[in-house]
Structures are given as C-alpha cells and as structure tokens.
Amino acid sequence: MEAQGNKCDGAWRDYAFFLALALAFRLFLLFATPNIIDTADAIHYIDTAKHLAAAEFRECDPKIPVLYPLLGAVVHRLVDDFEWACIVVSLIASTLLVVPLYALAREMHGRGAARIAALAVAIGPWFGDYAGRVGPDALGCTLWFASIVLLARGLRRGRGWLAAAPWAFFALHLTRPEGTVLVAASVGAALLLCAGSDNRKLLRLVPFVAMCAVLLALNILVNRAITGQATANVRTQIALSEMDYVPMAATGIKLFGEVLPIMLGPALLLFLGVGFFRPEHARRRDARLELYVLYFAALQLLAATVLMSPEPRYLMSVIAALSIWSARGLVLVSVQAGELRWGRWLRPLPAVFLVGLLLTGTATSVAADRFRGRPGAPLEYKAAGRWMKAHLEPGLIFTRKPQVGYYADMPTTGPDLDDTLEEAVRRARSVGARYIVIDERYTVHMVPSLKPLLEPANAPAGLELLVELRPYPESKVVIYELVGGKEGREKAEFTRQETESRSKRALP
C-alpha cells in the first residue's frame, strides 16, 4: 500500500475535478433528455415525501424506505415542485458517488486506477441517467460505497471512520430494502477483512456491531409506534416472504447473461479480466480488501436475484465496483503500451478508448430520444395527464399505468391482466371510475383484451370518447368517460371513505 502521506498527494484536486465533471455531465443529461415519472414506485416516493413534509407520518406507506423521500421533503423547502425536489436529491447523491468510489479504488489499486474508475462513473451513461430520475437508486449506490469505505477504514484506522460507519450502513438500510441485509452481512465482511490480523481490528468491530444494533432497535420501535409492525424494514420482510426459486433462477440468468454485460459495456468488460487476473510487480495487491469488496458485490447480486427484478438500477453499485478492476486493467495495459515504440503516443489510447465509448453511448441515447419517432420514456402519459387536469373534473381513472393519474392529479386503479373487455368495464364501474384511459405503449400489450378501445368505433355502450392523443408515433392515448355510472361512483367513494376511517381508528 502507498504511504499515508503520498496517498493525500493530489487527492483533493482529483476530488474537485471529478465532482465538477460528474455534476456537469449529469446536468447536461438532465436537460438534454425528456423528463417524466417512469415507474409506479416513483409516485409512491413523491407521495411519501408530501406526507413527510406535512408531518403526516401515519399516512406514509410503510413499504417505502424513508430516507430518500425525507430528503426530498427537505429539498422541497427550496424547490417548490416535489418531483423536481426528489430529482435534485438523486442528482446530488449521484454526483457525490465519485468521492467514496475514488477513495476505495485508491486504497485498492493506487491513484491511476482511482482516477480511471472515477472517470468511468462520472461520465457513465447509466449513472448519469439515474441522476435525473425519481427513486432511491442513486442515493443507495453512493451510500453503498460510503458504507464499505467507512467500515474498511474504521477497522484499519479507527478514529472517526469507525464512528461514522454504523451511520452510513443505517442510512443505506433506510434507503434500499437490501440495505438491511447488507447491515447484517457487514459483520462477515469485517471478519474477512480482519482475519489473521492483530486483535485491535477485531476489537473495533465490537462498537460497530453495538451501534448498528442500537440503531436498528430504535428503528423497530419507531416502526411499531407508527405502523404497528415490529420490523426493521417492511419491504425486506415482504421480499423474503415472497421468494420463489423458479423466477429467482430466471432472474439470476438474465442478470449474469444480459444485464451485467450490457451495463459494463465493451470497454469496461474488455479491461475487467486484465484487472482481475494480471499480476503487478510494482505494487503489492491488497487481496483482503479486494475480497471484501467482492463480498458486498456478490451480496448485491444475490439481493437483486431475490427481489426477482433484473433491472439495471439494482446493479449500479456492482457495476461501479467492477469498474475499479476494469480501471486497474486499463492502467496496466496503458503502462505496457508506454514501453513500446511510440509509447508516448500509445499510452493514452486505452483511456481515450474508454472515454470515446462512454460518450458515444451517451450521444446515441440523447440523439435517439431527440430524433426517433417515439421517445424511450412514455412522454405521452404526461401529455394525457396534463390534458385531463386542464379540461376535466377530478375523478377516478381506470388505467394500467398510474403516471397519467399522477400528472392529472387524480387517483387511479386498473384492470387485471386476464380481464376481458366486458369484465374490465364492469370492474371500472364497480370501483366508481369516472374515466378509462387506454395507451398504445403498454396497456394493449399487458391487457390485450383492451386493444379494441384504441379505436373509438369499437367502444361498447356506456363509454363516451373525450379525446384521442398521439403526441408521437406509436404512442396513442385514448380517454373515455364512463357515462351512467354516477351511482356506482358515489357508492365506491362511500366505501373507500369508510375503509380509510376504519384503518385510521385501527392504528395505535
């Protein structure tokens, strides 16, 4: 390992440069690409932020980890719109990722690899994309690295690092459902890092475990007081109770065979093997620290498999961790190239290759959203919702995706996937829906029986066409009003109010 004095040489300049680069890149992507709520979870996080801002703690959904919406509620004091307040939290958290990543990479492989790893994350398209989304993924990734860096330094150096480590892990627990598992698993990681060393490092584990236990116990008491459930993390408990090994196996295959290679991309994937397996005589490798990081990366992969969701957002921390070895491989190739004839010109080529591919991927993504017929994000939902808010009276919307209702500022419900057209209309009336919204992008593929409603001529009696919108090719949205359903709506509203009243009386 490098001497402590040498480790600080240039570090602050590197931190400042990569923070500025990451922020500039994320701001560019934020304003260069269309902006829309693209998941149902994002709406839940915004709703929770609204309840927290209004101190309506009992109205919060206990399945939503609280830290991200809490930060959104805090930022809302400066940013009037809740959606943008939450995006600001993602933007800041994603920018800060370069700090713990650089620190960890420098501990493992030196300054050169740290700079390449920070560069890959600063201008990586995946990281830039999630910086502009509503969701805890960017915050969770930054806390993932902060936690493992603080624990490693705390065990090896003590002092303030050790005091900060439990708080970082607890913040991760309050941000992501798998954070609770990582808190528990941190003990095994610490033993892996300290095995064979002097007893001082093992003794430092005692206050860390004690502080984590105290924080989790307090969290359980707060959850019990608010929700009546004595659990550290409601969402983690639900995920563990719904484990199904067949979908888990399919998820694992897709993660390893498709999602990971795509997210790494050809450049990082090319240098990854070199970084893992090639020896280096000029610097002794810190094998324990490398195994420690791989341990957490493997747990994150396992968590994504258990959650049965092979989405890129669950693998951001894994991709960032693997980029550290890719950075080492790139540095080794660059050094070897420098020893060849014309080495002065060849040495920068690996880094230029990496930057070129990352920026090409970004430019392709931005251009696709700007110039292709239909954007990748469902922007037609925003157009439909805003039209409804401007032209219609509030009412319950019957639709498959909730984003239209979010932008219309109206509640939503939806059909079952197996509903026939008649069953879906009957279900809409039974719940008191006022409007039915059908879209070409998702609904007609998820509920094929509703596809005839894309053409108003096929609409059954009782559905009155309000508007057809087609802001982009293959993005048609048709909005109907359910006529003759006033009595059903009033009955459904009365039932809903009675249910809410009983639920509030049942809370402790």
Image (spheres, rainbow, N blue to C red):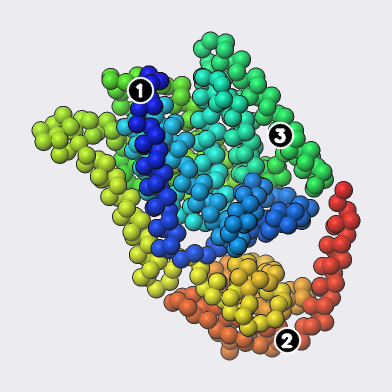
Helix, strand or loop under label 1: helix
For discs 3 and 1, the disc positioned in front in the rendered view? 1
| Residue 40: mark in rendering | none
In the displayed structure, 59 sits above or below 494; it is above
Give residue 301's position: percent from left, percent from top: 52, 39
Q: Nearer the viewer, residue 363 or 456?
A: 363
**Residue carrying label 1:** 6
Helix, strand or loop under label 3: helix
Amino acid found under the numbered disc labelled 1: Asn
Give residue 468's position: percent from left, percent from top: 55, 84
Q: Tag 2 or tag 1, which sits nearer the N-term?
A: 1
Q: CA distance from mark 1 to mark 2?
A: 75 Å
Query: Does the rendering let one see residue 225?
Result: yes
Q: Residue 60 falls in which quadrant of the image? A: bottom right
Query: At 33% from the left edge and 38% from the top edge, which residue is drawn?
Result: 116
Q: Are marks 2 and 3 in contact (CB under 8 Å)?
A: no
Amino acid found under the numbered disc labelled 3: Leu
**Residue carrying label 2:** 483
Query: Does the rendering let one see residue 451?
Result: no
Helix, strand or loop under label 2: loop
Q: CA distance from mark 2 to mark 3?
A: 52 Å
Q: Residue 382 falls in which quadrant of the image? A: bottom right
Q: Nearer the viewer, residue 188 or 341?
A: 341
Q: Are marks 1 and 2 in contact (CB under 8 Å)?
A: no
For discs 2 and 3, the disc positioned in front in the rendered view? 3
Q: Tag 3 or tag 2, which sits nearer the N-term?
A: 3
| Image-based side of 203 in relation to 226, left or right | left
Q: Tag 1 or tag 3, which sits nearer the N-term?
A: 1
Mark 2: few, some, or many residues within 10 Å (few <14, many ≥20)? few
**Residue carrying label 3:** 216
Query: At 72% from the left edge and 29% from the top edge, which residue is drawn?
Result: 214
Name the image quarter holding the N terminus: top left
